[in-house]
Image (cartoon, helix red, strand yellow):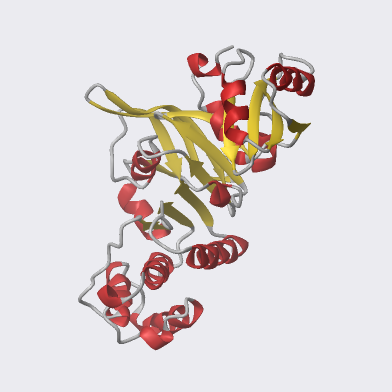
Amino acid sequence: MNGDFAIEARGLSKHFGDLKAVSELDLKVPKGQIYGFLGPNGSGKSTTIRMLCGLLTPTGGSATVLGNEVPGSATALKPHIGYMTQRFSLFGDMTVFENLQFIAEIYSFPKTDRGARIDELLEKYDLADRRKQQAGTMSGGQKQRLALACAVLHRPELLLLDEPTSAVDPQSRRDFWANLFRLAEGGTSILVSTHYMDEAERCHRLAILDRGVKVADGTPRELQAGTGMHVVEVSADDPYRAQVALDCAGYIASVTQLGVRLRVLIPEEFDAPIARVRRHLDRHSVAADVGLTTASLEDVFVAVTMSPEERRV
């Protein structure tokens, strides 16, 4: 294994009967960075994470996590990873302190240091005043902070986070990501799955999964620069009419409405994209301002997950 990577996967696959949940996945997750899995439900994100932490046996391929082959060395790996699922999986009828104490027991955290470590986490994750509160009575954001505190209690080298912010408000999501950046700056490697575009943009690197296949991999900036599409923005008084007009243009791969604006994706093999769109709108007597813009991560996602039939070109 290359010492620069916390995770290396080679041809990793998982089949459930005829369903290919993950197919031939190659993956390299650098140490000390936040690496994102972006994809819709059913794209293979959770299945991959479960294989990497030894909970699922791959159908094919192999993976090395922190120098350990999985699933073969899953027991040796366990003390070095933290795992957090999207569903709150701690004990609702136990207090915040009792949950942390229970996790410390599971990981055999030294009893002499246990109290100080729990107090440190209660302060760091703004839970000190919830110490005696039953976990089941807390808000979504509070439960999320407790789950993260439990996941890092034993100071793991690697965090595996499966849709960790799916059930919390935007402020709690921002706070959660601030905590992740602090962990990464301290040397923790983090693999996090998400279907939120704004979260994916915060990752140092990310892979986009679609129907079990990795369709893109790189930094957000690299992915945005390599969509293979011209991105044209159309501002019209009647955006619906403009969209109907553009939907019938054979050279256009995708049209998405954002308020009064449209984002139009045109494959780069077509030249003069602005002139093309203007001519088409003029033909349909639609008045609009047309200009090129930079690709968003959502544009990237649309472009790389598009089937040849959907591209229409």
Asked if residue 26 is positioned above or below residue 64 in the image, the reply reads above
Question: What is the x, y in percent for residue 33?
Answer: 59, 52
Direction from residue 129 to residue 304 in the image, left or right: right
Q: Can the viewer see residue 163 in this picture?
A: yes
Q: Which residue is rendered at x = 40% and y = 32% of the image?
A: 62
Asked if residue 20 is positioned above or below residue 174 in the image, the reply reads above
Direction from residue 237 to residue 298 in the image, left or right: left
Question: What is the x, y in percent for residue 148?
Answer: 42, 66
Say which quarter of the image contains residue 238.
top right
| Residue extending furthest toward the front | 285
Q: How many marks?
A: 0
Say which quarter of the image contains residue 290.
top right
Question: What is the x, y in percent for residue 226?
Answer: 68, 29
Q: Can the viewer see residue 225 in this picture?
A: no
Specify the quadrant that holds the C terminus.
top right
Direction from residue 187 to residue 139 in the image, left or right: left
- Which is nearer the eye, 77 or 178? 178
Question: What is the x, y in percent for residue 31?
Answer: 57, 50
